Image (tube, rainbow, N blue to C red):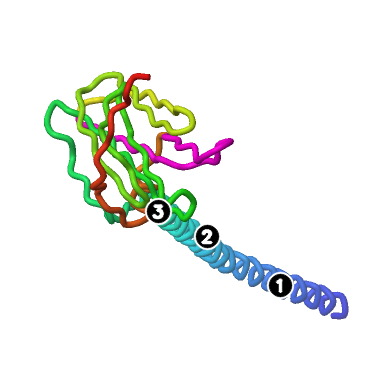
Amino acid sequence: MKIFSSNRALAMALAFTFAALGTQASQAQTAAPADAVQASSTSASAASSSSSSSSSSSSASSVSSSSASSVAAPPVVAKLNDVPPPPPGKGQIVFFRPSRFVGMAVSFSVREGDKGIGKLTNGTYFVQVTDPGVHEYNISFEARDTLRLEVEEGETYYVIQSIGMGIIAARPNITPSSEEAFQEKKLEITKAKPTDRTPG
């Protein structure tokens, strides 16, 4: 009976062991799909986050591109002095002299060759309409200053007259300029009459 009881106890112990192992295996199988679902959910969340980041990056790039386009836009020049475009088949040069205290009492004729085409007093301008091609303009007082321009059809050029100090008197100069410089201040159309250069 003792032997039989021992065997019976051993058998019961083995049965409990197998039952416990079966329960653990069942729990492991149940946990595996849950882990897979959790891993799949994590991957989907990461993909969604990546897609959102890509969308945000694309949106930021679009905003940056839009900002760059607005920065690249050319500035609008205020029209303080009205100059119409040249007539068909012609070009034109705007000669102007900003208002300055130095030399304000003197005026100078601008010439093409020896012929006077306009005279600039302080704070004035005039427009010379001409044929396309190379033209040479000059201005003089104590010394002569010459400017050579190639004029194209339909184009408007700007030339500024300034005054430097010579040895005895003021020395006028004419140099290429821009529409922005011409439009900085309100100027008057000159009323002074130009003079030709006389031989001698």
Residue 157 visible in the snapshot: yes
Where in the figure is residue 156, as x and y percent of width and height?
A: 26, 35
The overriding secondary structure of the stretch rendered in magenta is strand
Q: Mark 2 or 1, which is nearer the eye? A: 2
Where in the figure is residue 109, as x and y percent of width and height?
A: 33, 36
The three-letter amino acid code for the residue at tag 3 is Ser
User: Magenta segment range?
Assistant: 154-174
Where in the figure is residue 195, as x and y percent of width and height?
A: 28, 33
Taking the image as shown, residue 78 lies to the left or right of residue 104, namely left
Q: Magenta span has 91?
A: no
Q: Earlier in the sequence, mark 2 or mark 1?
A: 1
* Secondary structure state at the residue bearing disc 2: helix
The three-letter amino acid code for the residue at tag 1 is Ala
Q: Which residue is mark 1?
A: 15
Q: Earlier in the sequence, mark 3 or mark 1?
A: 1
Residues tagged 2 and 3 counted as in contact (Cβ below 8 A) = no
Residue, far front: 200
* Secondary structure state at the residue bearing disc 1: helix
Q: Earlier in the sequence, mark 2 or mark 3?
A: 2
Residue 46 badge:
2
Residues tagged 2 and 1 counted as in contact (Cβ below 8 A) = no
Q: Which residue is mark 3?
A: 99
Residue 140 badge:
none
Q: Residue at x 49, y 61 (%)?
A: 49
Distance from Cα at disc 3 to Cα at disc 1: 115 Å
Distance from Cα at disc 2 to Cα at disc 1: 47 Å
Above or below for 98 versus 165:
below
Taking the image as shown, residue 161 lies to the left or right of residue 192, namely right
Q: Residue at x 37, y 48 (%)?
A: 180
